[in-house]
Amino acid sequence: MNPRLGGFVLLLLMWHGAAVMAGDYDFIIPEAEKKPYELGGRLEGRYIYHRLNEDAARYRLNYHQDDPGGETHAYQAQVELTGSYQWGPLKADLLTHHAYADTYEKNEWHNDLYEGYFSFTPTPHLVLDAGKKRILWGKGYAWNPAGFLNPPKDPDDPALNQEGRTLLALDLIKSLSTGGLANLGLTALLLPVIDNWANPEMGGENALNAAAKLYLLWYDTDIDFIYFEGEDQPRSLGLDAAKNLAENIEVHAELAYRQDVPRVTLKEDGSVKKTLADPVSWLAGIRYLNTIDTTFIAEYYHNGSGYDRDALRDFFAYQKTAVAQWQATADPATIQRAGRMTQPYYQQRNFAKDYFYLKISQKEPFDILYFTPWMTTVVNLQDFSFNLQPGMTWTPLTNLELNFRAAIPVGPANTEFGEKQDIVRPEWWVRYYF
Amino acid sequence: MHLKHPACFLVLCLVLLGPAAGHGDPLTGPQILAQVDRNLQPGDLEMYRKIINIEPDGRKKEFVLWFLKKDQDKVVTLFISPASEAGRATLRLGDNMWLYIPNVGKPIRITSMQSVVGGVFNNADIMRLDYGVEYDVAHLSEDQGQYLLDLKAKSGTVAYDRLQMWVLKKELVPSRIDCFAATGMRIKTLHFKEVKDIGEGSIRPAVMETDSPLYQGYRSVMISANLKKRRLPDEVFTLNYLPRIKDLR
């Protein structure tokens, strides 16, 4: 060996040995240095395969003008960007969503501001927010009847970001050191409707909506009292609670009462009955973790404005009648009307009266770290149709998340899940965080 | 130190009385445990923790989190990295625990046996309160030149029903803790290493390693660093404040 090369190798070995002897642990944590700004984001690619049920009511309504056959494919690419900047007690936060979706029906771009707001925190007792921000209230996993301002949720993809609402918010926080009441928090919101850019879905021009939530931590129980009302929104009152019963058991519940909520009921002959109702909805749930790291989440949900078995039967019978008329007359007006009339039902994620939700997930089975397979089911307790959904989340590399799920609706004709458009809908998505 | 708080007063008494006890009567189990708590988490503080999950093939995944503690029963953690976890925050008030995930947008109640990072550490390990808050000393003995404390959980909401804690006599910090379920099964063992100053003169083990018969061949390591004394208002340790906790870093 060349003596100079030998010396270099010896030096390298000594340096390596010294490095090892310095210890197996690195005590330097560069992340401890805080910057006034933060930038980050998430890339996502998603593919959905639809195996279609050509006899389903929804299929006929959606595809009466064309024939996609027995299957369709959907692709989506999206990027979400986050940023924040802090000047002492003042902070600005931003979350933007940019997506390109390629589906059977259309190809389109979405560029949305999901969140953009200023926060002013003069003391930890008081926080003021102004701008566009997500509001998510309630304790349930699959449903939040008391979350009157919540955007529609996907319980099996909880990390999905959603668009916020434009608001002025005040948060008052107080901790108490004596008695059963440990914490108290009051959140008050004003949500104006201004043209097309501020809460247009919440009422007519210049309508003003108000909401409040009083949070109590009382004898180790979370309790929220919720209020929401607007010029074009029904008065809504909510109550929720959650508590840990043991080191592996949590229970939660929600109760919601709404006044003068417009309700549309569709009869088999296509006639429509419009009423004002005062629905009471509620939810009770439990989360249990066993000794082998299997988590069970079970919830019962009563949807006060939902439809019972007979109403659902009429609903599906009307759609089939409309399709039959269209096939006999070739007049698209009949089926187009059916499409409009059924919207109040289909706009709701679950439109029946009583549901049961169960999710079973196993943390890191077979010693595969950061891998969680799961299975969920949503059962319509009125018609006993159900949706079965196996899935998994795996993070094989830092910041890279792989997801899969397959929705399998099961039920006979004229039932909620039996009339779903898909026979099976597997879905794959990859997320990369930066 | 805020002497209005009875826990602070108790700790002060123990500090003042500690040397006297050392010259005369041997330390009792509760005295040893109180000193262990004081040495591991000296009062109200903030520090950084790096958690390293090590797989049998040597692959590693690191998490960095910011840790805040006040009094004996209030803990907040904030994940700083990796990017997929950044912004996640947990709050613990006694037996109550919550997790806030930015994408989910609201805090959810969690239990002590769950794990927010995967690997061998669970929430109770990461958001640990003082041992004296959750455990009573059932028995004190000596083993291999160290104190051996047998600790029994004060309530059913504590993650481990029983602990066996070996304590170094000179430093009064643990060297090893075996954690048992109510069935008597050993859930995991914590090994404490590298006793050193981790900030502001706090001399304690900077490294906690854990292994578990439930995760054969897997190890998790927690490194503590950058400790600073910091006293924050109680309102910081509340559910309403949790989404904003990173503003205080």
Image (cartoon, rainbow, N blue to C red):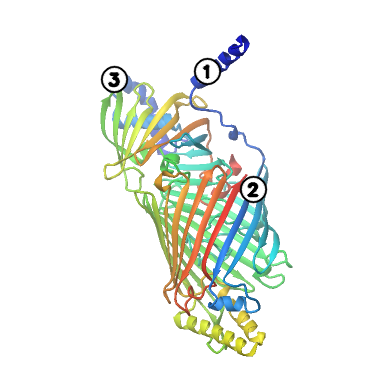
Q: CA distance from mark 2 to mark 1?
A: 39 Å
Chain letter, disc 3 residue: B
Q: CA distance from mark 3 to mark 1?
A: 45 Å
Look at label 2 and name its amino acid: Gly
SS at badge 3: loop
Image x and y of residue A372, in percent? 46, 51
Q: CA distance from mark 2 to mark 3?
A: 61 Å
Q: Residues within 10 Å of mark 1 (few under 14, many from 20)?
A: few
Extreme residue toward the top, this view: A3
Q: Which mark is residue B24?
A: 3
Question: Who comes first in sequence, dot 2 or dot 1?
Answer: 1
Q: Nearer the viewer, mark 2 or mark 1?
A: 1
Image x and y of residue A19, in percent? 53, 21
SS at badge 2: strand
Look at label 1 and name its amino acid: Ala
Q: Which mark is residue B184?
A: none
Image x and y of residue B37, in percent? 39, 32
